[in-house]
Amino acid sequence: MAACGGKSGNTAGPKNVAGIDDTEGLTVPRVDPKLCDTKGKKVTTFDLNHDNRPDVWKLYATADEGGTTVEILTCKQVDLDHDGNKDYVQTYSRTGELLAEKFDFTFEGEMDAREHYDKKTGKIYLIERDSDHDNKPDVWEKYDDDGRLESVRRDRNADGKPDLWEQYKSGELLAILYDDDFDNKVDRKDEVKSVEPPKAEEPAAEDEGAIENAPPVDESGAAGSTDES
């Protein structure tokens, strides 16, 4: 990643600081343990905009592979707007697969969405969204193996339980179910009629002769003569 600005002589290299408050006279924000597990991890930081404050934190766990000690990335936290708050987080499995991504789209200090990945396929299978910014998910989007939307559950009254269900097939909305009195039972259902593409019109009788006698089409796609001379 490219960095710009900052004082001459600074580099965007790593600093091995385990979230301490002060390193070489610099005030360093701590890694946020609420965003990913920091216990027993090595923390490496990067200062991409050269303001003497880290804006990327990478956490590593150590593992033994055939007698060799290796470091495995388990979490990355990023401060995209350089205000001291983490806006983007990646978490990984102990074997290095991406498990989830968290996003603060509003840059207000709270995560607005979390995407979950399948370890085997690497594809998103679930997205949780916090649409009312109360630090609790209220929209759950489920995706099939081809990445198409399969269902959406929505919590409209902020009680932590879905009360509206959207059903999809091959990414197309089929029906919406409502729990209007919030008793965890469906009260009504709206079916969405699929729109079929218009059928091709049959040629009129008087046009059939014209179609049969139409000049051939050459390789360039244009109608032309069959004369090769």
Image (cartoon, rainbow, N blue to C red):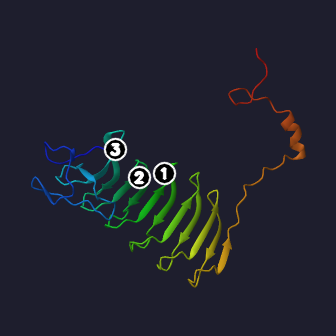
User: In front: mark 3 or mark 2?
Assistant: 3
Look at the numbered discs 1 and 2 and tell me whether their residues touch, using CB distance below 8 Å.
yes
Q: CA distance from mark 1 to mark 2?
A: 8 Å
Q: Which residue is mark 2?
A: 93
Secondary structure of the residue carrying tag 2 is loop
Residue 65 in percent (x, y) is at 36, 41
Q: Mark 2: which amino acid? A: Ser
* Quadrant assignment, res 150: bottom right
SS for dot 3: strand
| Residue that lies at the very extreme toward the left in this rendered image | 25
Q: Residue at x 18, y 52 (%)?
A: 51
Q: CA distance from mark 3 to mark 2?
A: 15 Å
Q: From the image, tell me which residue sits under label 1.
A: 119
For label 2, the crowd category at 10 Å Cα-Cα, with few meaning under 14, some 14 to 19 and many 20 or more, is some
- Whole-percent x and y of residue 118? 50, 53
Residue 166 placement, left or right of 65: right
Task: Give me the residue at 31% from left, 50% from top.
Answer: 61
- Amino acid at dot 1: Lys
